[in-house]
Amino acid sequence: MEELIPISVTVGDRSYRIKVESQNEETVRKTAKFINDKLVEFKQQFAGKDMQDYIAMVLIWYATQNAQEVQGQLVEQDLNDGFARLEGLLNKGLAAFSEKG
């Protein structure tokens, strides 16, 4: 296991000191930037809220996006599995037909 390195990231109005594996540092920093960009976007769309409201909005948006991606991947996997089973059945049918002819 690689040693963890301490980094500071800012989300909203707060700075957080966290430890990450060095190969994940860039991903964590990009994620924090993405979150902050979404916070700014939501602040412009929904004026008059406090930072906690904006963070909750971003969290719900992000979780929903992630859930949709996962659901899409599961549907794709189900389709692939179904096509593989169908292909197997067709191959068996063709093999049986070839044996008779």
Image (spheres, grey):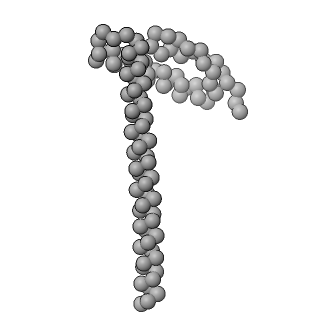
Q: Is residue 37 visible?
A: no
Relative placement, left or right, of 25 versus 46 is right
**Residue drawn at (46%, 87%), measured in percent from left and top?**
99
Relative placement, left or right, of 64 versus 23 is left
Query: Picture coordinates of residue 52 (x, y %)?
Result: 42, 14
The quarter of the image holding the C terminus is bottom left
Residue 97 falls in image quadrant? bottom left
Residue 62 falls in image quadrant? top left
Taking the view exactly as shown, the residue that stands out farthest to the bottom is 101
**Residue drawn at (44%, 41%), measured in percent from left and top?**
70
Relative placement, left or right, of 28 versus 50 is right
- Please, is residue 87 above or below residue 27 in the view? below
**Residue drawn at (71%, 33%), measured in percent from left and top?**
1
Query: Picture coordinates of residue 29 (x, y %)?
Result: 52, 22
**Residue drawn at (41%, 43%), measured in percent from left and top?**
71
Query: Picture coordinates of residue 79 (x, y %)?
Result: 40, 56
Q: Is residue 77 visible?
A: yes
Q: Foreground: 49 or 2?
A: 49
Query: Picture coordinates of residue 59 (x, y %)?
Result: 42, 24
- Please, is residue 32 above or below residue 69 in the view? above
